[in-house]
Image: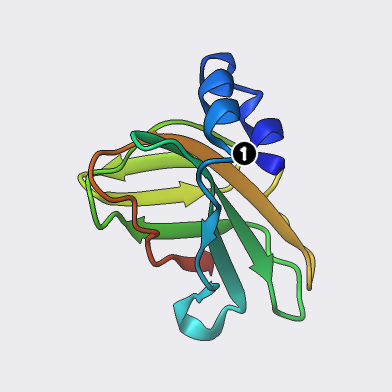
Amino acid sequence: MSASASVSASASASASVSASASVSPSRSTSPSPSGGGSGVTATYKIESDWGAGFVASVTIKNNGSTPITGWRVNWTWGGNQQISSSWNAGLTSSGRAVTAVNLNYNGTIPPGGSTSFGFQGTYSGTNAAPTLTASAS
């Protein structure tokens, strides 16, 4: 299961995720196309969820006919989710709004190509998947 491989970067979360990965099935959303016709989409997937925390991944795909040299993904949490660590993206948040941008090594995506990033977070109550907005930057 990809959850163990993704979480191995965080030793303290690895034991928790390993113990619960079989308990909670992965949930995912459909790609959320960006506005403006840029041809960039992003897909959110919960890799594992153990009731008070989770690991999620986001895949950004270039559906256009030319390479993009930078990307941005925005979303607003529906609940009280908080990101505690991330990899392969620069994440910033203000209240419930989150913005993820490429790093210097993963901004270029060829036509038909994709890249991804992930994060670990916490929550209480529900952990509904957000609606993503993706764009080339």
Residue depicted at 30% across the width and 43% down the height = 81
* Residue that sits furthest to the top in the current view: 12
Up/down of 121 relative to 79, above or below: above
The kind of residue on which mark 1 rests is: Asn
Question: Residue 60, can we see it?
Answer: yes
Q: Count residues near mark 1 (Cα–Cα under 10 Å), then give few for <14, some for 14-19, many for 20+.
A: some
Q: Quadrant of the N terminus?
A: top right
Image location (x, y in percent) of residue 133: 44, 68
Q: Quadrant of the C terminus?
A: bottom right
Residue depicted at 49% across the width and 75% down the height = 34
Q: In this view, does 131 lie to the left or right of 1?
A: left
Secondary structure, mark 1, is loop
Near-viewer residue (114 or 14) = 14
* Residue that sits furthest to the front in the current view: 23
Question: How many circles with numbers are drawn on the protein?
Answer: 1
Q: In this view, does 91 lie to the left or right of 79?
A: right
Q: Name the residue under label 1.
A: 88
Up/down of 40 relative to 52, above or below: below
Q: Is residue 84 left or right of residue 32?
A: left
Image location (x, y in percent) of residue 78: 25, 57
Up/down of 56 relative to 29, above or below: above
Residue depicted at 33% across the width and 34% down the height = 52
Question: Residue 137, can we see it?
Answer: no
Residue depicted at 29% across the width and 38% down the height = 123
